[in-house]
Amino acid sequence: MESLLETYNGIQECYYKNEYYSVRDNGAILRHPLNNRRTRPTDNKWTFGKPNVRTGYLEIASVRVHRIVATAFHGEPLTKHHVVDHKDTNKHNNRPENLRWVTRLENIILNPITSRRIELVCGSVEAFLADPSKFRDKFKSPNYEWMCGVSKKEAQTCKERLMAWAKSGKPLQGGTLGDWIYNRNLSIDFDDLRIEELEFVNSLSPNAVQKAQNWKTPSEFPLCPNENSPHPIIRYFKNLSVGDVFSKNQFTSSIVEDFAMSKDKDKLWIMCKSGDEHPIKPYSLAEITYQSNVFIHDSLGTFFEKVGVEKQFTLKQGLEWTGGDSIDDYC
């Protein structure tokens, strides 16, 4: 985590909610003490923030870090109703280039999951933005009732901004605005994956997601292939090497201890040891599959003893375990 905190090129400063912050362009922030007040435990320390288990956003003292970073690098929002959009939909990627101020309507449409729901109700995103009044009785969910009051002017402004972003980021080439919304998110096929909110989390590496139930903190996977190939799991397998960093985030890192591929070549199992000095559970086991153009990373658990992870690693391969029990069998 220390090396990630110290990897940056520039610093901006800002006031947010009567607090003074220094902000690095890697998304890290430092809160300064209040004038003539006692220094608080989280003052004068560079941090990425701590994840809120309910919302998934990084926070410092219950204040969302992404709003502080956006204020420092992009200025104050135009209105109090503006929110911050994470361009790659990764709530932990608070680098300034990944953030922008948007209206609530723009934020809803930029989210591939909620945008899909709009398509199901209206036929397409363009149809809704062309004339929202046609669909005012269609949004039955309480979470979407406010959309019934979207004006034609607001919708037109929203469409113009979205089209500008689409053309600057990835040309539509005759496709729909909805196509761009899905394609910008690593080309994940939402129908095939049957994604519900919080089922998957985008990783910090291209072509990679994580199963949110077991691996909530977005991580970087240095050995994950950046491009698609005819045999993606085999390609990933060839990138692996004992002693290399398998994953890392602002909290921890893991080093490859051993790895194996399933007989049908559609799964990988990676046995790792923590890169931290004194972890409570130093060993971990990950499973990797490939679906709809992305590598899906899942955590199969953490372990107190090496024999504990070796047992699960062996059993996952369909092999007989003869090494006996460990403390992990009883915890």
Image (tube, rainbow, N blue to C red):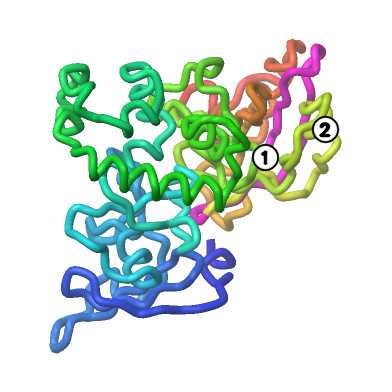
Magenta stretch: includes residue 269: yes
Direction from residue 203 to residue 63 in the image, left or right = left
Residue 210 in view in this figure:
no
Residue 272: which disc? 1
The region drawn magenta spans 250-272
What is the crowding at mark 1: few (fewer than 14 residues within 10 Å), some, or many (at least 20)?
A: many
Residue highlighted by disc 2: 235
Spatial CA distance of label 1 from label 2 is 19 Å
Residue at (49, 36) in percent of width and height: 181
Instruction: Using the image as rendered, state which of residue 196 and residue 239 is in the foreground.
Output: 196
Residue 205 in view in this figure:
yes
Magenta segment main secondary structure: strand
Residue at (51, 45) in percent of width and height: 166
Magenta stretch: includes residue 86: no
Instruction: Answer above or below: position of 14 versus 276.
Output: below
> Judging from the image, what secondary structure is the residue with disc 1 in?
strand
Residue extending farthest right: 238
Type of residue at label 2?
Answer: Arg
- Count of marks overlaid on the render: 2
Instruction: Answer above or below: position of 276 versus 296.
Output: below
- The picture places residue 281, in percent across and down from the top left corner, at 53, 41
Label 1 or label 2, whichever lies nearer to me, is 2
Nearer the N terminus, badge 1 or badge 2?
2
Instruction: Using the image as rendered, state which of residue 223 and residue 131 is in the foreground.
Output: 131
